[in-house]
Each structure stands twice: as C-alpha cells, then as structure tokens.
Amino acid sequence: MIRLVTLFFLFSCTLYAQTFTITPQTTIYFNKQNRVTKTAAQELATYLAPVIGKMPQYSAVQPSSISQRKIILAGSDTTVLKDKKLSFALHRLKEDGFILYITPDTLYIVSNNDRGVLYGTYYFLEKYVGYRFLSPDFTYTPPPHKLTLQPVLDIQEPAFAYREIFTTESDDWKYALQNRLNGRLGHRTLSEYQNPRFGRGVNIFNMFTPFALVPDEKYHCNGQLIYSDHEVQQIAAKKTGEKIAELVPAKEDYLYIQHEDRNSFCPKDGKTAQEATAAFLRYGIYIARHAEAAPGHRFLLEAYQWTREPPETFTPLPKNISVMFSTIEADFANPLKAPENAPIRNDLKAWRRYTDSVIVWHYNTNFSGYFQPHPNLYALSEDIKDFAKLPHVKGLFLQGCYETPKSEFAALRVWVFAKLLWNPRLNVDKLIREFCHYYYGKAADAVYAYIHELHRTAKQLHQKLLLKTPPTAPYLSDASLDRYYQILDKGYAKVQKAPLFKAHLEEVYATLDYVRLLNSTDENKRAVSRKRFLHFLQTHPKIENYAEGAQIDSLKQIIHMKRQKPKAPKESRRLQGGSEWRDFQEYTLKLCCARIEQDPKASDKIAATMRGNQGEWGFQLDVNTNLPKGKWTIYARAKITLNPGHTLLDKSKVALFFGIYPTLIKGAWFIAQFTPGEYRTVKLGTIDTRKTDAGYIWISPPENDIVQKLWIDRIFAVKQN
C-alpha cells in the first residue's frame, strides 16, 4: 500500500484537467519486435474499431512528435518509454502488475512483463471502453460512442502471484488472459497452449507420479514409495533431472513433486502421518538439490491428504521450494474459517513455520456431477478474501470442471473468481449481478434470484458440500427443484425472442434438468426435462463427460430409463439417536468396465452390471470425497445371475470380491450365500474415516464362468454412534 501511495504522489502533479480522446487517427505504439506487446496493440485496435468507427493504426516505430496523440504499450522492454517516472514506477510493481496512465496527449499501458501489457489492455477495454469478456464464446461489445477519457493514474497489482481456475473454459489462453489469470497446470503445460502471440503462463509441470519415477515394487510400501530410502531419493532425483531437461522450464515455472494419490503413508517413513510427512519433505528437498539441470528452478511439494498437516518440527524449506496445499477434505458449503473446516485452515496457517510460499489447491465443482447445482459461490469468495490476508499464501489453484465445457455456471465462476483473485476486496454479490446483467439480458434478475434461493436453501438445510455430493442431497429435492424452475421461468418469458440470452439461460436449466432426470419419479416432469436436456447436449457437442471419468453417452442411456424413489434399506431404518446414513446409487459410483441397466428389482429400478468372467474393480466409491468424518459400516446391495449348466459344487465358488483400498479390509462372498436373481445386502466392513487411511471401496466380479452377471444396485454407509 505504501508503494502505491508513493507512486500516486509521484504522478499526481502531472495529471491535467484536459481530456484525451481516442479517434481512428490515434496511433498505437508497441515495443519493436516484441510479439506479445504487438498482440496487445492488435487486440486494442481490433476491439476499439466497433466503438470509434474504424480501426486505429498500430506501429513499432517510435513516435517522432510528443504532441501527437498516441497510445504506448510497453512491457519488459521499456525503451519505447520517454517518461522516466514510468520507468521508475515499473520497478516498484509486483509481477504481472501494470500502470494505466492517461495524460492529455498520451495513454500509457505499461508493465514490468509482457503478459502484464495484455492484462492492462483488456482491463482498459473493460473498465474504460465498456467491454465484458464473459466466456470464450461470448464477449459483450459496447455500442459506438465517443471515447473521451479523463486524465488518470490507475495502478493495478494482483493479490496472488499465481492465479489459475482449472475449468475447461479457461483452457482458452486468450480468455484466461482477458481475465488476468496466469497459471497453467496439467494438460495446459503442453506446447499447444503456449501461443507465441499471447506469450506463456506460469507452468506447474508434474514430475511423474512416484511409482512412475521409481517403478520397482521393492521400494513400494502401503500405496506409497518409501520416501526415506536413500536409493529411492537417488533414483527419483535422476529421473526428475531427465524430465527437467526435456521440459526446459522457464524461471517462473514450478516443478511439482507429488506422492501417490492415496490417503495412506508408509510405516517405514514414520509411525504417524506427521513423521511420514517429514520423510516426504526430505525426499523433495533431496530431489530439488540433486536433480540434474535443477539449479535455479522452483519446486512445489504436495501437502495433500496425509501430508496436509506439517511436521511438529522441521527446518525451514529452501527458498526455491514452495508448498501446494490441498483442501480436499473440506465442507465447501462453508468457508475454511468456519468451525467445520477449522482443522484444515489451522494446517494451512501452520505451514508458515516452514515456508513463506504456499499455493492453495482449492475446489470449485462437484466431481460426481459437473452439471449439478453447487452452492459454494459465497463460501469460496470468503476463502479468497481470507487467503489474501495470509502472508505466506502466494497463489490459488481453483480446480473446477476440467473435462467438459458448459458445467454448472462455468463462465460465471471463471469471470467472478478471476476478478477476486486479482482484487479480493471486490464485492462478490455485485460481480454476480454484473455478470448476470450482461450474460442473461432481461433474464438476469431471475438468474440472480435463483442463485440466492439455491444458496439460501442449502444453508437452511445445513447442507454439506463434499467433493462428491450426490444429486439426492436435500437441497435438490423435487419440491426445491419446483421452486428453482418457477424462478427461472419468469426470466425465460422475457428472453424467448432473444436467441442468445435464451441459449445462455438454457445452460442454467440444464443443471436442474440433470438432477430431475436422476432423481424424479414423475414421468411427466422427466419428459420435459429430458427433451430440454438432450437439446442442450445437441447444441453443445463438445460436452464429453457429466462427472469425473463418466462419459456423457452413459448419461444419455440413464435418463431414458424409468426410475422409482428408492426406499431406505432396513439397516438404516433401525437408526436411532440422530445417526445418519448415506446412499450411493449406481450413477454416483465410479464405474470401470460396468454398464447401467434397467432392473425392476433394484431399489430405484436401475443397477450397474458386469459380466462374471471379468476381474476388474469395476464398482468403486471414493471414501474421502463421499463420507464425512466418522465411523461408518459399509454395505452393498448385490445380486448374481448364473450361467446354465452349473452344478451343486459350483456353489462353493466366489460370487464377488470386495475391499476397501489400501487398508487390509478385503474379502469375498460366495455363490451359496445368494439366491440367484435376488438382491441381498452384503456387508463390506466398518471404517473410521477419522483414523483410517482408506482410499476407496471396490467390488469386482469373480472372474469365473459360473456367474453370468454381477449386479450392484447401491452402496450405502450407516454411521455408528
């Protein structure tokens, strides 16, 4: 703040009362032979054209007369600048910051890097010209008008050095730049996303999974590497160095060192998770110090699941090592500072003992249903404001729907949260209203009212939002859906003759239709939703998934099947004293090699099936993302059908295998325990998610030719008092 005040007084005496008018005769100048600032000049000229009537010229030639009205764009190369105060001020800005400085004869958009010039250009077009870059396929263009600007000094700096919203829409690098995002992780680090015209982002390169780095099983332990083993460290450092040499990372990039994606640690690394975390940190430090070609590179060490809580004692991490902190266990209906999430926030604060550089991996979607309404807008905005107050939090990675476009409020989430990542002091409610105004036209008030009603309902019902919340959640009851539809219908009546805004509103309807098609037993209501939802999918052919790893083609089959409201199993009906149970129908499971089929004997008339001669863990349920902390007994409703020709002896053969990975809970149920063609409840085990390292529940067919087909109706969990 002191730095910005100093800069303001430095420039205040140069601001005049005269205005600066941009006309087609105004020339835009940019750094000579600089592709990114040239792109900024082209973009500025292109977007100014419909407003001022004609595209202004842009040139890399230095202006000969200071009296000529001009626009100057300057990034890392400031030779185009004649104003010494601007050159001085640039050195005071944070990375990606920019200065917009208007005098009576010149408009300056200058930054200390080239990417910042693009940010400044798009910011100018939004704030001073009237554009809104709302989605990759929709930009609001202001009507033609005289562009007369008052003298101003507008200094902009980002609250976070690393800013990424991992949503399919922001894969579009130009759209990400328009919203001042800079982070690129995973598939985004590939060369196809490094557009030379628009420059490159701050990449986070994955340095392989640990088992890929060190595949020899003698170094594996309880689902992880033995991170304290010196040979493991040497092998991992050598492989990491080879990967670095292939990638040729830039100075600002990060190299991401992970452990295996399982909530289990190796007892050889320590008796407690904190001791094992210390071993993992030493493993990461060794790689950072010894990987060939590593000097000067920045590394990220994962703080995720069992490594989330820092060790009790440890030395400060080297300056070139940062921490990527994950909030995967949170209740996303509430901010991290809420009592429900206090342990996570306490762990985040505790990492400051060892590092002054943390990037928070936070979450912004429902992974079991990308279209499902997910009322976390206000909680997440509170988190962003909170993170900005923690001095060691330097960046934020918001993981949203990364597999398909047009997920629930995808564009709104990118636009609103990108604004907050730059300036957390902005009012989230005003941002939502502003987006709705431009994106939904005359239906804006209805969409805004629906957003508030959705959040109000979830809060009133004390709804928890885990990473995978089923569509059977109370805030999505049929009665609640009716209310939501009624609100949106008022807006629909106003945009029926406005095709663009009507199409945008249909994106919102699709989220409610998705839930109704999975939950409702009213065939008349389902028929309306089915017709509208299929039209939505037809008009957006790039939609490939409806949940993480779940393809849209399987959903198209499910929504044509007849469904009934499932009754609570008898094991849950015995509950007393405020205990709870959780139901996971077939469409909420992770299905590998399984099909969804109509089955009149299933609780909802639909089941997931696999052939008996298959052996894959085809039915899976993630424990950490689906079950709150507590002691749970896990059941499945299963049935088998048999191939003809089986004998009495065949009844001793296995009907299904099951387990809770990577704990020791595993077992089998046998053909003799089933009445073929009839469902029975299968007990899978009891786990305490406060203590266990359970990753996911799995069920597989027996891999024999006696069982024709294995059917799984549901998996359910009953909480123990």
Image (cartoon, helix red, strand yellow):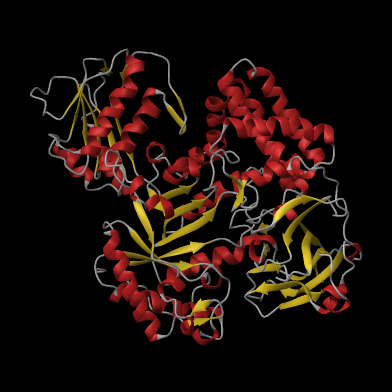
Q: Work out which quarter of the rendered image holds the C terminus and state it.
A: bottom right
Q: Residue furthest front?
A: 645
**In screen coordinates, is 212 left or right of 97?**
right
Between residue 6 and residue 683, name the one nearer to us. Answer: 683
At 66% from the left edge and 76% from the top edge, which residue is drawn?
691
Give the percent coordinates (x, y) of residue 262. 56, 70
Q: Is residue 652 visible?
A: yes
At 34% from the left edge and 30% from the top edge, which residue is drawn?
124
Give the percent coordinates (x, y) of residue 229. 42, 85
Q: Quadrant of residue 83?
A: top left
Between residue 337 and residue 163, name the one nearer to us. Answer: 163
Q: Is residue 509 visible?
A: no
Q: Quadrant of residue 528?
A: top right
Between residue 661 and residue 121, name the one nearer to us. Answer: 661
Give the percent coordinates (x, y) of residue 101. 26, 31
Vertical side of 580 occupied by 524: above or below: above
